[in-house]
Image (spheres, rainbow, N blue to C red):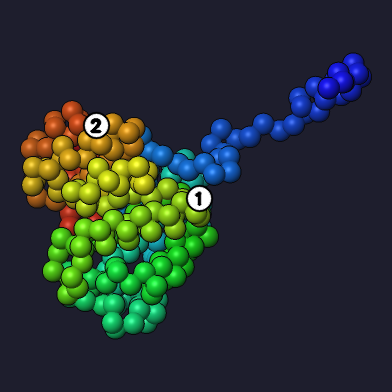
Amino acid sequence: MRRPSLLVALLALLLAACTTAPEPDAKAPGDRWTPRPGTHWQWQLSGRLDTSVDVPVYDIDGFDHSGDTVAKLHRDGRKVICYLSTGAWEDFRPDADDFPKSVIGRGNGWEGERWLDIRRTDVLEPIMAERIDMCRDKGFDAVEPDNMDGYRNRTGFPLTADDQLRYNRLVARLAHERGLAVGLKNDLDQIPELVDDFDFAVNEQCAQYGECAKLTPFVEADKAVFHVEYELPTDRFCADSRRLKLSSLLKKYELDAWRRAC
Protein backbone atom coordinates (compact mmCIF):
# COMPACT_ATOMS: atom_id res chain seq x y z
CA MET A 1 0.00 0.00 0.00
CA ARG A 2 1.35 3.46 -0.90
CA ARG A 3 2.05 5.94 1.89
CA PRO A 4 -0.10 9.14 1.71
CA SER A 5 1.70 12.34 0.82
CA LEU A 6 2.63 14.71 3.65
CA LEU A 7 0.00 17.24 2.46
CA VAL A 8 -2.78 14.64 2.45
CA ALA A 9 -1.81 13.48 5.92
CA LEU A 10 -1.84 17.03 7.29
CA LEU A 11 -5.28 17.67 5.79
CA ALA A 12 -6.59 14.47 7.37
CA LEU A 13 -5.30 15.55 10.77
CA LEU A 14 -6.94 18.97 10.45
CA LEU A 15 -10.29 17.44 9.49
CA ALA A 16 -10.15 15.05 12.42
CA ALA A 17 -9.44 17.91 14.83
CA CYS A 18 -12.43 19.87 13.53
CA THR A 19 -14.85 16.97 13.89
CA THR A 20 -17.29 17.45 16.75
CA ALA A 21 -16.70 14.95 19.53
CA PRO A 22 -19.71 12.80 20.55
CA GLU A 23 -21.58 13.70 23.72
CA PRO A 24 -20.37 11.69 26.74
CA ASP A 25 -23.66 9.80 26.97
CA ALA A 26 -24.06 9.22 23.23
CA LYS A 27 -24.58 5.60 22.26
CA ALA A 28 -22.82 3.97 19.35
CA PRO A 29 -25.09 1.94 17.07
CA GLY A 30 -25.99 -1.34 18.75
CA ASP A 31 -25.02 -0.15 22.24
CA ARG A 32 -27.54 -0.45 25.07
CA TRP A 33 -27.67 1.09 28.49
CA THR A 34 -26.75 -1.41 31.20
CA PRO A 35 -27.31 -0.11 34.75
CA ARG A 36 -24.71 -1.24 37.26
CA PRO A 37 -25.29 -2.82 40.68
CA GLY A 38 -26.18 -0.29 43.37
CA THR A 39 -27.67 2.26 40.94
CA HIS A 40 -30.28 4.37 42.76
CA TRP A 41 -33.77 4.55 41.29
CA GLN A 42 -37.36 5.68 41.65
CA TRP A 43 -40.36 3.52 40.71
CA GLN A 44 -43.64 5.38 40.32
CA LEU A 45 -46.63 3.89 38.50
CA SER A 46 -49.51 5.92 39.97
CA GLY A 47 -50.33 9.49 40.93
CA ARG A 48 -48.88 12.73 39.63
CA LEU A 49 -45.27 12.05 38.64
CA ASP A 50 -42.76 13.58 41.04
CA THR A 51 -39.70 14.40 38.95
CA SER A 52 -37.78 15.92 41.86
CA VAL A 53 -36.39 12.68 43.32
CA ASP A 54 -32.61 12.97 42.96
CA VAL A 55 -31.77 9.58 41.47
CA PRO A 56 -30.27 8.58 38.09
CA VAL A 57 -33.05 6.15 37.07
CA TYR A 58 -36.83 6.50 36.87
CA ASP A 59 -39.18 3.58 36.14
CA ILE A 60 -42.59 4.90 34.98
CA ASP A 61 -45.68 3.65 33.14
CA GLY A 62 -45.13 3.58 29.38
CA PHE A 63 -48.74 4.30 28.45
CA ASP A 64 -49.37 7.04 31.00
CA HIS A 65 -46.45 9.31 30.14
CA SER A 66 -45.53 11.23 27.02
CA GLY A 67 -42.29 11.63 25.16
CA ASP A 68 -42.12 15.14 26.61
CA THR A 69 -42.02 13.69 30.12
CA VAL A 70 -39.24 11.29 29.13
CA ALA A 71 -37.33 14.16 27.50
CA LYS A 72 -37.63 16.26 30.67
CA LEU A 73 -36.25 13.44 32.77
CA HIS A 74 -33.40 13.07 30.28
CA ARG A 75 -32.63 16.78 30.56
CA ASP A 76 -32.42 16.27 34.32
CA GLY A 77 -29.80 13.58 33.73
CA ARG A 78 -32.03 10.53 34.27
CA LYS A 79 -32.37 7.27 32.42
CA VAL A 80 -35.99 6.23 32.04
CA ILE A 81 -37.50 2.72 32.10
CA CYS A 82 -40.83 2.01 30.38
CA TYR A 83 -43.14 -0.15 32.49
CA LEU A 84 -45.33 -2.52 30.45
CA SER A 85 -47.32 -5.62 31.22
CA THR A 86 -46.27 -8.31 28.77
CA GLY A 87 -47.68 -11.37 30.53
CA ALA A 88 -51.12 -10.10 31.52
CA TRP A 89 -54.05 -8.44 29.74
CA GLU A 90 -55.25 -5.14 31.21
CA ASP A 91 -58.78 -3.97 30.41
CA PHE A 92 -57.84 -0.31 30.89
CA ARG A 93 -55.17 -0.09 28.18
CA PRO A 94 -55.93 1.51 24.80
CA ASP A 95 -54.98 -1.69 22.95
CA ALA A 96 -57.09 -4.00 25.15
CA ASP A 97 -59.39 -4.90 22.22
CA ASP A 98 -56.41 -6.17 20.21
CA PHE A 99 -56.26 -9.30 22.39
CA PRO A 100 -58.61 -12.13 21.33
CA LYS A 101 -60.56 -13.75 24.14
CA SER A 102 -58.79 -17.05 23.46
CA VAL A 103 -55.50 -15.73 24.95
CA ILE A 104 -57.05 -14.15 28.08
CA GLY A 105 -57.04 -16.36 31.17
CA ARG A 106 -57.62 -16.11 34.90
CA GLY A 107 -57.26 -12.95 36.96
CA ASN A 108 -53.80 -12.29 38.36
CA GLY A 109 -54.95 -10.65 41.59
CA TRP A 110 -55.05 -7.06 40.31
CA GLU A 111 -58.29 -5.40 39.27
CA GLY A 112 -58.83 -5.45 35.52
CA GLU A 113 -55.88 -7.78 34.83
CA ARG A 114 -55.82 -11.38 33.55
CA TRP A 115 -53.00 -13.72 32.65
CA LEU A 116 -52.15 -14.24 28.97
CA ASP A 117 -51.55 -17.48 27.13
CA ILE A 118 -47.89 -16.82 26.39
CA ARG A 119 -47.73 -19.90 24.18
CA ARG A 120 -49.62 -17.91 21.54
CA THR A 121 -46.70 -15.92 20.27
CA ASP A 122 -48.40 -15.67 16.88
CA VAL A 123 -50.95 -13.37 18.55
CA LEU A 124 -48.85 -11.74 21.25
CA GLU A 125 -45.61 -10.95 19.42
CA PRO A 126 -47.07 -8.24 17.14
CA ILE A 127 -48.98 -6.66 20.04
CA MET A 128 -45.90 -6.58 22.27
CA ALA A 129 -43.79 -5.29 19.38
CA GLU A 130 -46.17 -2.34 19.03
CA ARG A 131 -46.00 -1.65 22.76
CA ILE A 132 -42.21 -1.68 22.74
CA ASP A 133 -42.27 0.50 19.60
CA MET A 134 -44.22 2.99 21.72
CA CYS A 135 -41.50 2.94 24.40
CA ARG A 136 -38.81 3.49 21.79
CA ASP A 137 -40.73 6.28 20.04
CA LYS A 138 -41.24 8.11 23.33
CA GLY A 139 -37.49 8.00 23.94
CA PHE A 140 -37.32 5.52 26.82
CA ASP A 141 -33.97 3.84 27.53
CA ALA A 142 -35.30 0.49 28.71
CA VAL A 143 -38.36 -1.68 29.24
CA GLU A 144 -39.64 -3.29 32.43
CA PRO A 145 -41.92 -6.12 31.22
CA ASP A 146 -44.24 -7.26 34.00
CA ASN A 147 -45.96 -10.58 34.73
CA MET A 148 -43.09 -12.65 33.38
CA ASP A 149 -43.65 -15.72 35.57
CA GLY A 150 -47.10 -16.94 34.60
CA TYR A 151 -45.96 -20.55 34.47
CA ARG A 152 -45.75 -20.53 38.28
CA ASN A 153 -49.31 -19.23 38.67
CA ARG A 154 -52.87 -20.40 38.03
CA THR A 155 -53.29 -18.71 34.67
CA GLY A 156 -56.00 -20.90 33.14
CA PHE A 157 -53.44 -22.31 30.71
CA PRO A 158 -51.06 -25.30 31.07
CA LEU A 159 -47.93 -23.18 30.85
CA THR A 160 -44.54 -24.82 31.33
CA ALA A 161 -41.13 -23.50 32.30
CA ASP A 162 -40.02 -23.90 28.68
CA ASP A 163 -43.00 -21.81 27.54
CA GLN A 164 -41.91 -19.07 29.92
CA LEU A 165 -38.28 -19.16 28.84
CA ARG A 166 -39.30 -18.95 25.19
CA TYR A 167 -41.66 -16.02 25.80
CA ASN A 168 -39.29 -14.08 28.06
CA ARG A 169 -36.53 -14.37 25.49
CA LEU A 170 -38.95 -13.17 22.83
CA VAL A 171 -39.71 -10.05 24.88
CA ALA A 172 -35.99 -9.44 25.44
CA ARG A 173 -35.32 -9.79 21.72
CA LEU A 174 -38.07 -7.33 20.81
CA ALA A 175 -36.57 -4.75 23.17
CA HIS A 176 -32.99 -5.30 22.01
CA GLU A 177 -33.96 -5.06 18.34
CA ARG A 178 -35.24 -1.57 19.12
CA GLY A 179 -32.07 -0.54 20.93
CA LEU A 180 -33.66 -0.71 24.38
CA ALA A 181 -32.37 -2.39 27.51
CA VAL A 182 -34.76 -4.81 29.19
CA GLY A 183 -35.17 -6.08 32.74
CA LEU A 184 -36.22 -9.50 33.99
CA LYS A 185 -39.17 -9.01 36.34
CA ASN A 186 -39.27 -11.50 39.21
CA ASP A 187 -39.09 -15.06 37.70
CA LEU A 188 -36.33 -15.91 40.16
CA ASP A 189 -36.08 -19.62 39.39
CA GLN A 190 -35.16 -18.96 35.75
CA ILE A 191 -32.46 -16.37 36.41
CA PRO A 192 -29.58 -18.80 35.65
CA GLU A 193 -31.05 -19.43 32.19
CA LEU A 194 -32.05 -15.81 31.48
CA VAL A 195 -29.36 -13.60 33.01
CA ASP A 196 -27.50 -13.35 29.70
CA ASP A 197 -30.69 -12.31 27.86
CA PHE A 198 -31.53 -9.38 30.14
CA ASP A 199 -29.71 -6.18 31.08
CA PHE A 200 -30.96 -5.80 34.66
CA ALA A 201 -33.51 -7.32 37.04
CA VAL A 202 -36.57 -5.92 38.82
CA ASN A 203 -37.76 -7.77 41.90
CA GLU A 204 -40.57 -7.48 44.40
CA GLN A 205 -40.34 -8.81 47.95
CA CYS A 206 -37.33 -11.12 47.70
CA ALA A 207 -36.40 -10.18 51.28
CA GLN A 208 -39.86 -10.99 52.64
CA TYR A 209 -39.64 -14.46 51.11
CA GLY A 210 -35.93 -15.06 51.77
CA GLU A 211 -35.02 -15.21 48.07
CA CYS A 212 -32.69 -12.27 47.44
CA ALA A 213 -29.59 -14.44 47.03
CA LYS A 214 -31.17 -15.88 43.87
CA LEU A 215 -30.53 -12.50 42.22
CA THR A 216 -26.75 -12.81 42.66
CA PRO A 217 -26.13 -13.88 39.02
CA PHE A 218 -27.20 -10.41 37.85
CA VAL A 219 -24.85 -8.67 40.27
CA GLU A 220 -22.01 -11.01 39.31
CA ALA A 221 -22.68 -10.06 35.67
CA ASP A 222 -22.33 -6.37 36.68
CA LYS A 223 -26.05 -5.73 36.09
CA ALA A 224 -28.31 -3.83 38.48
CA VAL A 225 -31.06 -5.43 40.55
CA PHE A 226 -33.85 -2.92 41.22
CA HIS A 227 -35.65 -4.26 44.28
CA VAL A 228 -38.68 -3.22 46.34
CA GLU A 229 -40.29 -4.36 49.55
CA TYR A 230 -43.79 -3.39 50.64
CA GLU A 231 -44.32 -4.90 54.09
CA LEU A 232 -40.90 -5.12 55.77
CA PRO A 233 -39.39 -2.06 57.48
CA THR A 234 -36.05 -0.97 56.05
CA ASP A 235 -34.13 -2.18 59.10
CA ARG A 236 -35.24 -5.71 58.18
CA PHE A 237 -33.72 -5.78 54.69
CA CYS A 238 -31.39 -2.86 53.95
CA ALA A 239 -28.27 -4.37 55.51
CA ASP A 240 -28.63 -7.50 53.39
CA SER A 241 -29.46 -5.40 50.33
CA ARG A 242 -26.24 -3.45 50.70
CA ARG A 243 -24.27 -6.66 51.16
CA LEU A 244 -25.83 -8.15 48.03
CA LYS A 245 -25.44 -4.84 46.10
CA LEU A 246 -29.16 -4.53 45.40
CA SER A 247 -30.83 -1.19 44.62
CA SER A 248 -33.54 -1.45 47.26
CA LEU A 249 -36.58 0.64 48.14
CA LEU A 250 -39.50 0.45 50.52
CA LYS A 251 -42.65 1.36 48.58
CA LYS A 252 -46.42 1.31 49.02
CA TYR A 253 -48.40 -1.21 46.99
CA GLU A 254 -49.96 1.55 44.89
CA LEU A 255 -46.45 2.58 43.76
CA ASP A 256 -47.03 6.29 44.07
CA ALA A 257 -44.21 8.79 44.60
CA TRP A 258 -43.54 7.83 48.23
CA ARG A 259 -40.30 5.93 48.73
CA ARG A 260 -37.74 5.09 51.38
CA ALA A 261 -34.35 4.04 50.04
CA CYS A 262 -31.73 1.86 51.67
Q: Is residue 56 visible?
A: no
4 left or right of 34?
Answer: right
Residue 179's disc is 1
In the rendered image, the vertical position of residue 236 relative to residue 137, given as above or below? above
Residue at x 17% of width, y 54% of height: 252
Q: Nearer the viewer, residue 155 or 112?
A: 155
Residue at x 34% of width, y 32% of height: 222
Q: Amino acid at mark 2?
A: Lys
Q: Amino acid at mark 1?
A: Gly
221 left or right of 215?
Answer: right
Q: Label 2, secondary structure: give it.
A: loop
Q: Quadrant of the N terminus?
A: top right
Q: Which residue is mark 2?
A: 245
Q: Quadrant of the C terminus?
A: top left
Using the rendered view, name the quadrant where residue 260 is placed: top left
Label 2 vs label 1, nearer the camera: 1
Distance from the alpha carbon under mark 2 to that under mark 1: 26 Å
Q: Position of residue 12 (x, y in %)?
A: 82, 25
Q: Position of residue 122 (x, y in %)?
A: 39, 73
Residue at x 8% of width, y 46% of height: 208
Mark 1: give few (<14), some (14-19) or many (20+) Cα within 10 Å. some
Q: Nearer the viewer, residue 249 or 72?
A: 249
Q: Position of residue 20 (x, y in %)?
A: 71, 33
Using the rendered view, name the quadrant where residue 157 is placed: bottom left
Using the rendered view, name the quadrant where residue 171 is placed: bottom left
In the rendered image, the vertical position of residue 248 relative to residue 93, given as above or below? above
